[in-house]
């Protein structure tokens, strides 16, 4: 089996890990973690849909699925970070950034048969900003709690790692010759596997509010 296909399959399978952990640990999850669990379910369903479309049903163009994924991700993760922030100023920033990114995603979804390079790049930038702001918030907790014991620390780290590593791949994918894209997409698959492990660690932890 070619290495790009192997990592692609492992990447899809790894998406089930945080979903299973969330299901097992569901009663201990607070509102934010349950919203994140919903996002992980949505994400793995999209991955399965893409995999089936490409490998089983031989769909030639799966770009509409990616456009829908980006738009829903912007809204859902925007809501998540709104609740993650502890003061009204940061909450207002999250609303402004989420709406702005949603507008960009909708505007560039006029042709849903093209790869959503700008919308997915905008989503990546949004998540990098959100995750960095959250890490800044964690520097000034009302009550000291070791970082490694905080659920959202691990999940936020996974989001920052995934978005930070893949941002240039998403931005430049259209410029990469089609015959070489699979090799570059291994980067995405590896980071997705690592991110799913970080999400799962976070979902195992008992939620702890900073505010």
Image (cartoon, rainbow, N blue to C red):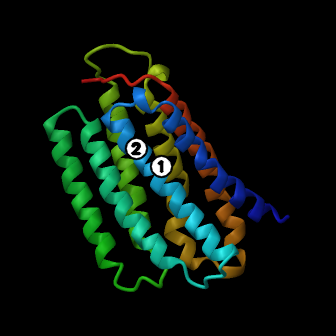
Residue annotated with mark 1:
40
Disc 2 secondary structure class: helix
Q: As displayed, is residue 113 above or below residue 204?
A: below
Disc 1 secondary structure class: helix
- Identify the residue at image location x=65%, y=75%: 54
Q: Residue 148 placed where, x, y %?
A: 49, 22
Residue annotated with mark 2:
36
Q: Quadrant of residue 99?
A: bottom left
| Residue situated in front as seen by the camera: 129 or 2 | 2
Query: Circles 2 and 1: CB distance less than 8 Å?
Result: yes
Image quadrant occupied by the N terminus: bottom right
Image quadrant occupied by the C terminus: top left
Q: Residue 65 placed where, x, y %?
A: 47, 73
- Identify the residue at image location x=83%, y=65%: 2
Q: Residue 145 placed where, x, y %?
A: 39, 15
- Identify the residue at image location x=54%, y=55%: 44
């Amino acid at each position: 089996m070619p290495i790009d296909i192997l990592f692609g399959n492992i990447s899809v399978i790894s998406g089930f890990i945080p979903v299973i952990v969330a299901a097992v640990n569901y009663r201990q999850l607070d509102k934010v973690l349950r919203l994140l669990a919903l996002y992980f379910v949505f994400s793995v369903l999209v991955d399965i849909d893409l995999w089936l479309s490409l490998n089983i049903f031989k769909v030639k163009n799966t770009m509409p699925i990616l456009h829908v994924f980006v738009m829903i991700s912007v809204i859902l993760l925007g809501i998540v970070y709104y609740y993650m922030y502890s003061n009204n100023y940061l909450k207002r920033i999250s609303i402004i950034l989420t709406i702005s990114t949603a507008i960009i995603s909708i505007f560039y979804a006029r042709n849903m048969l093209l790869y959503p390079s700008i919308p997915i790049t905008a989503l990546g930038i949004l998540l990098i900003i959100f995750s960095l702001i959250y890490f800044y918030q964690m520097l000034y907790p009302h009550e000291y709690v070791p970082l490694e014991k905080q659920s959202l620390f691990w999940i936020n780290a996974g989001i920052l790692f995934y978005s930070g590593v893949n941002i240039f791949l998403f931005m430049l994918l259209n410029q990469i010759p089609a015959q070489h894209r699979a090799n570059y997409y291994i980067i995405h698959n590896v980071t997705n596997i690592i991110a799913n492990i970080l999400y799962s660690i976070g979902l195992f932890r008992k939620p702890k509010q900073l505010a």
